[in-house]
């Protein structure tokens, strides 16, 4: 489980010394990497080109944070040759844990170099372009936002954690319609990254993305969608092995999301009603690359896991919901958005009262099983639909999470 970690971790003295020589900076681009030997050099070259082309009169640095790579990532980084006006700093993550540890490292370096803004990029991006740097950083550079989040054009079966869980939950609680809250790339103002570095819930792992967005929303920061593009990630190829990649990520993201809901309970319980547009807008952009999923295997996995853990789920769910789920698994009932919203909210409410790590793990395991069941239902419903038709289903579900918001307030 993800522990909060020791905030007394510090940069090495030689890194602090380098920071002193580099400061003050306008833009720090932090590149996060672990075992990305095939992609890292291209990402660095593209970032280098983007900074040089679009921000020639600014003080710039590229910071690479390496999460103890075991392949030839470090050798690939050494081949990188930046433009002379751009500083480069390569550091090891200042803590164990994963992506969040890399982000903390970059924030600490940004702090030491007095950076006015930070851009975060994953080192396994295959589709990154120089113009991305300008598009994502400009709202921060021009003082028009504290956080810029990309909107990536994704297949209807991609974003499996986002579409059915993180997006509707975040939209309902924090009144913020950011379509891909855990997109992975961000630009942040100094105000925001300084707030995040001191936050008690800073997660060292995959929970970092939802943490950045939620804190920005709940602390009254200005969040904008920017950077509209196709995104191809080396890691998306692992979707066919959910146990290895998606399930651990699901646990970390959901735990971070539920911890933040508890932390910001006063904020979201008292937030005003949100204005919504009356129209649905179609996307007529490029088409994303289809993502392959094995619905048959996921369905079997959901049914067997539900039957073996049904009794345990009674700790988190009312009997009426257990009965509905029984009907879905054993009689082919419909696992609809309304039921799913109630399931998510009951788990969020139950999480609030659990202090021990084992109890949290059990709760997240329960929700993970039901998330797979909801995804199977969604995937079946959108089979044969194009990207816009599927998006309407996702938007309707997010609307149901909003309609059920009072239900959450009543049980939380």
Image (cartoon, rainbow, N blue to C red):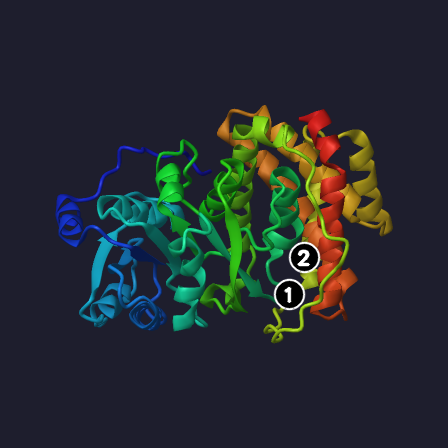
Residue 277 % position (x, y): 72, 52
Tag 2 and tag 1, C-beta contact below 8 Å: yes
Q: Residue at x 51, y 26 (%)?
A: 356
Q: Residue at x 32, y 73 (%)?
A: 53
Q: Which residue is mark 1?
A: 293
Circle 1 crowding by C-alpha within 10 Å: few under 14, some 14–19, many from 20:
some
Circle 2 crowding by C-alpha within 10 Å: few under 14, some 14–19, many from 20:
some
- Residue 91 visible? The answer is yes
Q: CA distance from mark 2 to mark 1?
A: 9 Å
Residue 167 % position (x, y): 62, 49
Q: Which residue is mark 2?
A: 298
Q: Is residue 160 above or below residue 108?
A: below
| Badge nearest the viewer, 2 or 1 | 1
Q: Is residue 132 left or right of residue 266?
A: left
Secondary-structure class at tag 2: helix
Residue 227 % position (x, y): 50, 64
Q: Is residue 74 above or below residue 23?
A: below
Q: Is residue 388 left or right of residue 125?
A: right
């Amino acid at each position: 489980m993800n522990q909060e970690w020791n905030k007394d971790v510090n940069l090495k003295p030689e890194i602090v010394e380098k920071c002193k020589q580099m400061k003050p900076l306008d833009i720090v681009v932090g590149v996060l990497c672990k075992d990305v030997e095939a992609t890292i050099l291209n990402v660095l070259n593209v970032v280098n080109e983007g900074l040089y082309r679009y921000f020639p009169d600014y003080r710039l640095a590229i910071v690479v944070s390496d999460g103890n790579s075991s392949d030839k990532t470090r050798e690939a980084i050494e081949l990188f040759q930046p433009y002379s006006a751009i500083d480069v700093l390569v550091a090891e993550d200042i803590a164990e844990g994963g992506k969040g540890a890399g982000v903390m490292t970059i924030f600490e370096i940004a702090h030491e170099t007095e950076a006015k803004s930070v851009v975060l990029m994953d080192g396994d991006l295959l589709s990154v372009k120089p113009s991305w740097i300008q598009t994502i950083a400009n709202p921060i550079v021009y003082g028009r936002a504290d956080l810029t989040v990309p909107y990536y054009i994704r297949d209807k079966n991609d974003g499996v954690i986002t579409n059915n869980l993180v997006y509707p939950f975040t939209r309902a609680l924090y009144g913020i319609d950011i379509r891909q809250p855990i997109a992975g790339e961000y630009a942040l103002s100094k105000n925001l990254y300084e707030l995040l570095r001191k936050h008690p819930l800073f997660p060292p792992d995959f929970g970092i993305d939802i943490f950045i967005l939620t804190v920005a929303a709940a602390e009254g920061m200005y969040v904008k969608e920017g950077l509209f593009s196709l995104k191809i990630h080396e890691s998306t190829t692992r979707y066919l092995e959910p146990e290895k990649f998606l399930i651990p990520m699901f646990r970390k993201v959901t735990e971070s999301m539920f911890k933040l809901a508890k932390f910001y309970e006063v904020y979201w319980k008292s937030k005003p009603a949100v204005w919504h547009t009356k129209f649905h807008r179609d996307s007529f952009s490029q088409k994303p690359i289809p993502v392959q999923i094995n619905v048959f295997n996921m369905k079997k996995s959901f049914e067997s896991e539900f039957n073996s853990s049904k009794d345990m789920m009674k700790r988190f769910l009312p009997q009426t919901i257990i009965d509905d789920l029984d009907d879905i698994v054993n009689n082919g009932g419909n696992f609809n958005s309304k039921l799913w919203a109630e399931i998510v909210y009951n788990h969020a409410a139950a999480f609030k009262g659990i202090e021990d790590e084992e109890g949290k793990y059990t709760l997240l395991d329960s929700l993970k099983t039901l998330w797979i069941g909801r995804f199977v239902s969604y995937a079946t419903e959108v089979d044969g639909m194009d990207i816009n038709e599927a998006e309407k289903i996702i938007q309707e579900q997010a609307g149901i999470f909003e309609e059920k918001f009072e239900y959450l307030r009543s049980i939380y």
